[in-house]
Amino acid sequence: MPKSLKKPAKSGPRPQDLFDLPEPAPRRPVGKARDVRRAASPAEAGYTAKHIEVLEGLEPVRRRPGMYIGGTDEKALHHLFAEVIDNAMDEALAGHATWIEVVMEADGFVTVTDNGRGIPVDPHPKFPKKSALEVIMCTLHAGGKFDSEVYETSGGLHGVGVSVVNALSERLEVEVARGQTLYAQAFERGKPKGPVKQIGRAPNRRGTKVRFRPDPQIFGAAHARFKPQRIFKMSRSKAYLFGGVEIRWSCAPELLAGVDGVPVEETFHFPGGLSDYLNASIHGTTLVHPDIFAGRSEKKGHGSCEWAVAWVADADGFMSSYCNTIPTADGGTHESGLRTALTRALKDHAERMGQGKRAAPITTDDVMIGAAAMLSVFIREPEFQGQTKDRLATAEAARIVEQAVRDPFDHWLAGNPAQANKLLDWVIDRADERVRRRQEKEIARKAIGRKLKLPGKLTDCTNTAQEGAELFIVEGDSAGGSAKHARNRTSQAVLPLRGKILNVASAGRDKLAQNQQLADLVQALGCGTGAHYREDDLRYGRVIIMTDADVDGAHIASLLITFFYRQMPRLIDGGHLYLAVPPLFKLTHGGKSVYARDDAHKDELLKKEFHHNAKVEISRFKGLGEMMANQLKETTMDPKTRTLLRVVLLADDREDTADSVERLMGTKAEARFAFIQEHAEFASEELLDV
């Protein structure tokens, strides 16, 4: 190697060798040392240490109330009351208070009183010149909830609740009865008006009384007043959540002018807890099963829970959950535990009943969509998302609730088989609807980019509007061929069905879902079924059942009507379903031909249209497929010469209709047999032109 390319020996590689960096350029020598500090710009000169604010005490709360109570709207305003009554409830949950009194005064003050231990008033060890009461009321992150020996379960986590209320109140007054002595202290906008004062003896009193009025400087003069309806409901809910406490309510009469449902005075005490709460909440609704599934678990380890669940048939469900009596409007881990427990137990019940395959598609959403549920958990040191505590984040809560609810729900299902089976069928229906809705959305999505694929046997009309378009549902390919030749191509479509369709009144959901003929019919109509029926998407203004004029044809027509009645009742209500009236006989004499729809009509025409001595040729049609296309058009399909029967459901006869369909088409053969015996003497076929 040339000497010029040899690298100098070193004890280790240089950094630029490792990273393949170029050699640094040599530094230019500097003659004199220079001061490289740059003069401050005018903007920098105007921003100095004196501009750094240090907010002390409760001033941060007044500057940024949204950080502590979520804003300054109505919800945030009422959160102040929630913080105060939650402190009283913590005393009750700890076993030190048996009653709480809530008073709304005409001047805007609200008072919350309990008979608990009372806030300590002795000097605080860390702040010997201040009482513990003043420290709690004026210092963020100060309180008794940090020590689990004082409160086993509580809603307070950060020690900011009542101090925030003090900061955002125009005036707040506290009275404490401890050791048969009464103490008092007043505050204005978070600042004490003086030290704690000893008022006098209180031999028959104990606990804490907090009286406060929200500050209009924070919430606005027009909005800084509590609403009686909201305070009333919040107070009552606390009594539901803990059966061991009595809530005493009173309100100034002048505040209730124009307010419905709020009494001047009332006492709440609900030993039944959440079961009583749910009963009151769902009063007047129709339930899938009559009994409420409710219970509570004993305290084990880190927590316990109470629940009440019912399934509502005619309304949407809801979930109201609480943690340590704090409402968790946004749910959380405890709600997840309840959902999981109910879903797994219901699926296990389906397996025991041999319905595992039907129940396989069930999800937690299917179980909970109609569930009216109340859930309350009591856990040590809960974790919430945000100071307003709207969502529980404690992971352990899901396990506590699932373990507490799972076995009792298993036993409830096993001990109430009739109710359990009703619930299972109802939930499976919800799952079927969800799957069907997803399929319909998929079809709709595909139809955006291209024409919707219609059933192969459908011969469609050229008219794409619902108005004026007709769909003829015919019996078999032979009749379908005749109808295709007899139709008006512009406005009349034909869908042939093969033989007798499925009886939807007695068939299970699996058979219904797998039946291709009914699937083709639903796809051809394009309007969906059940609760997802869409009138605007119906492709034909008239849906006409056209079957043979004999007993078999009448049977097929009754099966189709049953299908529409069960799956698309709104199609019937909309006046879209019709029955065609094809002829059964053709009467011919000389050059004259007339058509009769049945035996009675035939006898009538023989007397009316022909001479009594005439030798009339009578031919009987075996089916629509044997009719010439021009005959079918003239007698049954041409709007100018045909007769149609419109199927209607009378408003005052719907219960009888439902009963008749169940008796004649349902799963109980003995009901059909009894009906036939009862009406045997009237077994003659009649047609009524409506």
Image (cartoon, rainbow, N blue to C red):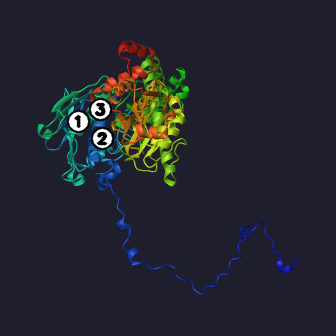
> How far, Cα to Cα, is label 2 from label 1?
15 Å
Expressed as whole percent of the image width and height from the top left, the position of residue 70 reads 33, 49
Q: Residue at x 34, y 49 (%)?
A: 68
User: How crowded is the residue under tag 1: few (<14 C-alpha within 10 Å), some, or many (20+)?
Assistant: many
- Mark 3 = which residue? 238
When asked about the image quadrant of residue 125, the answer is top left
Which marked residue is nearer to the observer: mark 2 or mark 1? 1
Question: Which marked residue is nearer to the observer: mark 3 or mark 1?
Answer: 1
Looking at the image, is mark 2 or mark 3 earlier in the sequence?
2
Image height check: is 601 above or below 5?
A: above
Closest to the observer, 282 or 411: 282
User: Is any atom of residue 433 visible in this view?
Assistant: yes
What whole-number distance in Å separates the C-alpha atoms at marks 2 and 3? 13 Å
Amino acid type, callout 3: Lys
**601 or 142: nearer the viewer:** 601
Under mark 2, the amino acid is Glu
Q: Secondary structure at mark 3?
A: helix
- In the displayed structure, does residue 330 sit left or right of residue 244? right
- The amino acid sitting under disc 1 is Phe
Going from the N terminus, do you reach mark 3 or mark 1 first?
Answer: 1
Please provide percent x and percent y for residue 545: 43, 34
Dot 2 falls on a residue whose secondary structure is: helix
Mark 3 burial class by Cα count in 10 Å: few <14, some 14-19, many 20+ = many
